[in-house]
Image: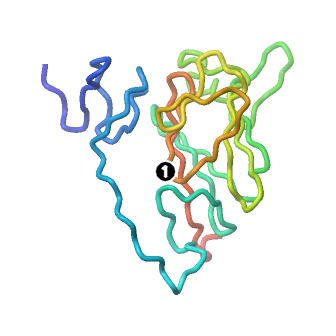
Amino acid sequence: MTTPATQRQCPQCERHVDVQTIICPFCGYVFIDNPVATTRALDKEDPDNLRSSRWGNSRLGQKMKLLLQLVHDGAEYAFDPMQVDLISLGRRDPATQEIPSIDLGRHKGEDLGISRKHLYIKRIENNALTVLDQGSVNGTYLNGQRLIPHQPRILRDGDEIRLGRMVIRVAFVLVDADSA
């Protein structure tokens, strides 16, 4: 069977995934064919590095938005820095009617293994963000590494989070002053 040019086969589970996928959403295999970035000189005119976000930036500047994109259906959630005190991801609880900040039940969350209380994203000092698995049944993976429940990890621009079998891409996006 021929694979379309936009897909590749995971060597571990042999399923077809998008060629830009870093982590296989089915088995967690990490594709290591991305080139290693070299050290770049800092821009002296932009000491806060806010003109453009670079992969790996852990600070959500005041001129940026947090963008979470669900890979399987393209849905996007954007948050201003001041809205990111605590964001919960999971599914609505029918018993208590508790609804998380992002209800992933609307995006096939139950089928993809999302717990009702799955993950928190929390802003800490210096506008850094952390992710914290809430003891979910199917686990949370940050760039292919399973998180230890209830232990926060720093979230960076360009990270990929997998909740159960749902993959979410993280971006810190500069907000144009004219469009704000």
Horizontal side of 103 relative to 74 (left or right) equals: right
Give SS at disc 1.
Answer: loop
Quadrant where the C terminus sits is bottom right
For this orientation, the residue located farthest to the bottom is 45
In front: 22, or 42?
42
For this orientation, the residue located farthest to the left is 2
For this orientation, the residue located farthest to the right is 96
Residue at 18% across / 28% down in the picture?
3
Quadrant where the N terminus sits is top left
Q: Position of residue 154 (x, y in %)?
A: 63, 47
Q: Is 97 rendered above or below residue 85?
A: above
Q: Which residue is mark 1?
A: 158
In front: 160, or 41?
41
Q: Position of residue 44 (x, y in %)?
A: 51, 85
Q: Position of residue 97 (x, y in %)?
A: 84, 21
Number of on-image labels = 1
For this orientation, the residue located farthest to the top is 95
Residue at 61% across / 45% down in the picture?
77
Q: Is 35 rendered above or below residue 91?
A: below
Instruction: Please identify the quarter of the rendering in which residue 12 is found.
Output: top left
Q: Position of residue 22 (x, y in %)?
A: 38, 38
Instruction: Please identify the quarter of the rendering in which residue 81 is found.
Output: bottom right
Residue at 54% across / 36% down in the picture?
142
Horizontal side of 26 relative to 44 (left or right) equals: left
Residue type at tag 1: Gly
Q: Is 167 rendered above or below residue 69?
A: above
In front: 54, or 108?
54
Residue at 33% across / 42% down in the picture?
20
Task: Tell me which colouring the rendered structure shows.
Answer: rainbow
Q: Residues within 10 Å of mark 1 (few under 14, many from 20)?
A: some
Instruction: Please identify the quarter of the rendering in which residue 47 is found.
Output: bottom right
